[in-house]
Amino acid sequence: MEQFEIQQAVDRIGRMELIFDLLQKVGNTSPAALRNNMLLKELLWTLTEYYEGGQWLQDYELDEQGLLPQNLKRGVLSQDGVYNFLEKLREESEKNT
């Protein structure tokens, strides 16, 4: 694995961390905002694509191989964190339809 690819992963994980943290904070205080705010909907789509599109798994595997910096915040790579958050939003969305 080239250093450039690892740096791309580090940058991507950092972006996803920011998005995940923001969406969790808003979702916990105002779940309706995630459905009604266009920017938040776009961020939610970005996080969903990251998680479900395969990039999350690649980044997770890099972490498992010990190729990511130790000081990198990696909550978005937890096996249940993003999944549980997205499922909670889906359930809430189904209740409101």
Image (spheres, rainbow, N blue to C red):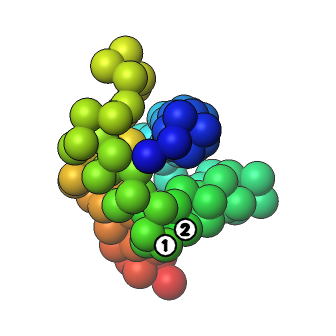
User: Is any part of residue 58 visible from this angle?
Assistant: yes
Callout 2: SS? helix
Indicate whether 33 appears above or below 72.
below
Res 71 → quadrant: top left
Q: Residues within 10 Å of mark 2 (few under 14, many from 20)?
A: few
In percent of the image, x 77 and y 59: which residue is there? 38
Res 12 → quadrant: top right
Residue 31 percent coordinates (x, y): 50, 53
Looking at the image, the residue that sits furthest to the top is: 71
Q: Residues within 10 Å of mark 1 (few under 14, many from 20)?
A: few
Q: Toward the viewer: 34 or 69? A: 69
According to the picture, the residue beneath numbered tag 1 turns out to be 53
Residue 27 percent coordinates (x, y): 48, 47
Q: Are marks 2 and 1 in contact (CB under 8 Å)?
A: yes
Callout 1: SS? loop
Amino acid tagged 2 = Glu
Please give the count of numbered marks on the rendered protein.
Answer: 2
Residue 16 percent coordinates (x, y): 54, 43
Residue 89 percent coordinates (x, y): 41, 64
User: Is any part of residue 26 visible from this angle?
Assistant: no
In percent of the image, x 50 and y 84: which residue is there? 97
Q: Toward the viewer: 34 or 63? A: 63
In percent of the image, x 62 and y 60: which residue is there? 46
Q: Which mark is residue 11?
A: none
Res 4 → quadrant: top right
Q: Which mark is residue 49?
A: 2
Q: Toward the viewer: 66 or 42? A: 66
Q: Toward the viewer: 38 or 73? A: 73
